[in-house]
Structures are given as C-alpha cells and as structure tokens.
Image: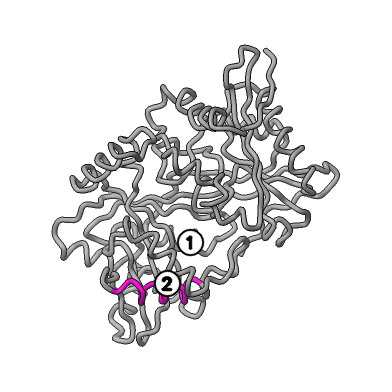
C-alpha cells in the first residue's frame, strides 16, 4: 500500500483531522473522544497564546484509496526551542496512525522536514503546542480511560516511535489512590511528622472560599513562583497571569478540592485538584453545542464525576521534607471524614515526570501508586550527536 501526505489547510481537511481518531478508536471502550473545540483551539492563532512566539502545521496521511490513515502536527515554540537544550528543538504531536511502520515513518519524516526547514535540530514527541498539562506524552502503560486533557493511544504506537529512532527523553507517571476517610497508604513515620505539623499552631490548612478568588490567585502565584518556576519550560507567573488562570478555572473549580497551607499566615503549600471532566465529556461525543452543554450540566449536577485530578501539588523549598506534604493530605482526609457525603472516591495525580524524584517521593509517601505511564521521546536529526535524558531536578 502506498501513502501520501496532505496539508491541513481548509475546513474539510481540518474536519478529517478531527474525525480520524473516531474511526481509529471506535472499538476501544476506554478511549474518550476529546472535545472538537479543544483540539481546534490548539491550532487557532486567535485562541492559542503560543502563536505569539511560535508556529504550527498539520498534515493528514492518505492511503492509495484517498482514505485517511494518519495525522500529525509539528510546532515550534521560540521561547523554549533553545532553552536548556543542546540543540534547537521543536515538537510533533496529535499523532494518530494505522498500524503500519511505513505510514508512521512518512508522518514522522514530514514533521522532521518542516522542523528542519525552520532551523530545528531535534524534535520531541508526542507533545503539545501549549502547556504540558495537556496532550503530552505517549501512553505506554495503564490503558484506562484518560483524564481530561491527557492523551490516550494505541498500544502499537510505542513500537512505531521507537522503530523510527525516537529515544526516551523522560517518563511521566500518573499516580492513583482512593479518597478515603482514613490515612491508609501513608506510613507511620510520615504520619508522625505530619501530625506534628498539624498540631503546631503556626501551621494552618484550609480549602479556598469561592467568594475570595482574587486572594487565592495571588497566594497561588506566590507558591508557584517559589516551588515550580525553576523547572524546564516554566517561568515566573505574574499577577495578571495568575488572576486569568483562576478565572479560567472558576467554572469547573470545586473549592473543596483546592487546598492551601500556611505558616504564620504565609502561603507555603498548595494542592490543586480538579474534577475529571472526561467523566462527562465521554457523553457528549466531542460536541459542546447546545445539546452538549445541556448534557454537561445534567451530568455535572447528578454527580457523574467521582474522580479528582491532582493538578498541582507542591511546597516551597524552605518547608520541604518537614511533613507539610503529608499534612496537606491529612487535613484533606479529616475534612472528608467530617463532611459526611463526599462525591469524589478516587484521586489521580496527573502527571509527575521522572526528572522530579522529589515529587515522585511525595506522591508515594501519601499513598499514591503508579497507574499510568506516558513517554516523552526525543529524536536527534544528527545521529552522531550525543543523546541526553532530561536532567533531574
């Protein structure tokens, strides 16, 4: 069978780009169709801020019957292409393909050629033309229904990537634990340290108040800049960015899932969880039109969501290793115990890179077990160049 590449450059080809996975995964009960608008906005210059300092291109793969057999996108983020890399590095993503190495190679070659034309010497994939919390990595273990924003893939994709020559850049772990009214899964040693923190009147833990979002947005910003801004691909968050982020999250944010820890009234730690919207998205078939919105509201108010996603969990450096991480979990568990009815039964911490062993250790200390593994790969265009894994933090 022969294949050809077609650029996505009009509404018809964009529709094919959106709909191809629907056919590919039609017999996979675990796949959840992403919202069409969520995919489209990644490639919309008016909606994706990354177009301010980057560019992207999409292609379809057609077989000799002109039937779609694959898709791929390539993109360059000028802000990070050279940052902490040994070479200018772009990315490919939104890869979907039939189980055919020749077809996959043509898609990868197309992305590689476009990136080379724009001065890149390597490509990461599959990644997102956007933030790391969405559409990032190749699922290789734990083929369960995906969390909202996270990719789900065919099991044979791992071979397609590695046979082409992609090398593992870093692993991404999604940890799971039950939300219980006790401290199961937490060791006695960790519990002892956490109890000392909780008993210290200088420390205080609480979930946010939905009537005071501006205050919590600023506290969120302060903690973020001290705990995460140093990581590759991230930078310090300013006040308007923090306010905009919390405003964006407000329609889906459950105040009882957003916890902040304080020492002498100074914000030092936070645990941001979000309801897993995919437990509703799976009912709307990719469409967030009037009917999709009605379905969304119906399932939201009938308690369809019982899984929370741990999106950000961190402690500023001066308070790490003292038991504050576990104290946050204990404070949350005590709240659940005293509340009575609580709709969430499961928590997935989504996701933690193997370049962040401290955070992996925290997830394990609070009873998390690895449920899913994604790979981020890197492909060097010069085969003579030394390959290096993502450095640990």
Pinpoint residue 36: horizontal percent, then vertical percent. Answer: 44, 38
Taking 361 as reference, is 300 left or right?
A: left
Disc 1 packing (10 Å; few <14; some 14–19; many ≥20): few
Screen quadrant of the C terminus: bottom right
Pinpoint residue 61: horizontal percent, then vertical percent. Answer: 63, 25
* Residue lying farthest to the right in this orientation: 384
Q: Residue at x 86, y 44 (%)?
A: 384
Query: Any mark on residue 361, and which?
Result: 1
Residue 239: in magenta span: no
Taking 136 as reference, is 302 left or right?
A: left
Q: Can residue 320 be seen from the camera position used here?
A: no
Taking 390 as reference, is 271 left or right?
A: left
Taking 137 as reference, is 206 left or right?
A: left
Disc 2 packing (10 Å; few <14; some 14–19; many ≥20): many
Residue 213: in magenta span: yes
Q: Disc 2 designates what residue?
A: 220
Label located before the other in sequence (1 or 2): 2
Q: Nearer the viewer, residue 270 or 46?
A: 46
Numbered disc 1: secondary structure: helix
Pinpoint residue 341: horizontal percent, then vertical percent. Answer: 15, 56
Magenta region, residue range: 212-224
Which quadrant of the view contains residue 161?
top right
Q: Nearer the viewer, residue 282 or 18?
A: 18
């Amino acid at each position: 069978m022969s294949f050809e590449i077609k650029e996505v450059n009009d509404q018809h080809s964009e529709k094919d780009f959106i709909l191809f996975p629907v056919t590919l995964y039609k017999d996979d009960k675990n796949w959840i169709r992403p919202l069409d608008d969520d995919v489209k906005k990644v490639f919309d210059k008016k909606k994706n801020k990354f177009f301010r300092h980057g560019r992207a291109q999409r292609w379809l793969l057609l077989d000799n019957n002109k039937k779609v057999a694959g898709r791929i996108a390539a993109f360059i983020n000028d802000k990070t292409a050279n940052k902490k890399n040994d070479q200018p590095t772009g990315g490919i993503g939104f890869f979907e393909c039939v189980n055919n190495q020749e077809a996959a190679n043509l898609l990868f070659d197309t992305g590689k050629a476009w990136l080379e034309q724009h001065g890149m010497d390597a490509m990461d994939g599959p990644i997102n033309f956007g933030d790391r919390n969405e559409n990032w990595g190749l699922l290789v273990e734990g083929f369960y229904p995906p969390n909202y924003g996270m990719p789900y893939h065919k099991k044979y994709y791992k071979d397609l990537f590695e046979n082409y020559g992609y090398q593992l850049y870093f692993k991404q772990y999604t940890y799971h634990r039950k939300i219980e009214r006790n401290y199961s899964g937490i060791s006695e040693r960790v519990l002892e340290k956490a109890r000392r923190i909780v008993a210290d009147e200088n420390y205080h833990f609480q979930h946010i108040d939905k009537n005071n979002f501006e205050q919590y947005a600023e506290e969120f910003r302060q903690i973020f800049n001290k705990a995460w801004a140093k990581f590759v691909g991230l930078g310090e968050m300013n006040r308007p960015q923090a306010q905009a982020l919390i405003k964006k999250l407000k329609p889906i944010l459950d105040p009882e899932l957003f916890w902040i820890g304080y020492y002498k009234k100074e914000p030092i730690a936070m645990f941001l969880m979000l309801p897993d919207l995919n437990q509703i998205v799976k009912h709307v078939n990719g469409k967030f039109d009037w009917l999709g919105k009605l379905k969304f509201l119906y399932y939201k108010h009938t308690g369809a969501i019982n899984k929370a996603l741990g999106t950000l969990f961190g402690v500023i450096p001066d308070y790490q290793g003292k038991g504050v991480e576990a104290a946050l979990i204990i404070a949350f568990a005590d709240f659940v115990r005293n509340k009575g009815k609580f709709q969430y039964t499961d928590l997935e911490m989504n996701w933690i890179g193997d370049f962040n062993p401290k955070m992996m250790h925290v997830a394990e200390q609070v009873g998390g077990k690895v449920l899913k593994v994604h790979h981020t790969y890197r492909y060097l265009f010069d085969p003579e160049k030394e390959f290096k894994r993502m450095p640990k933090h």
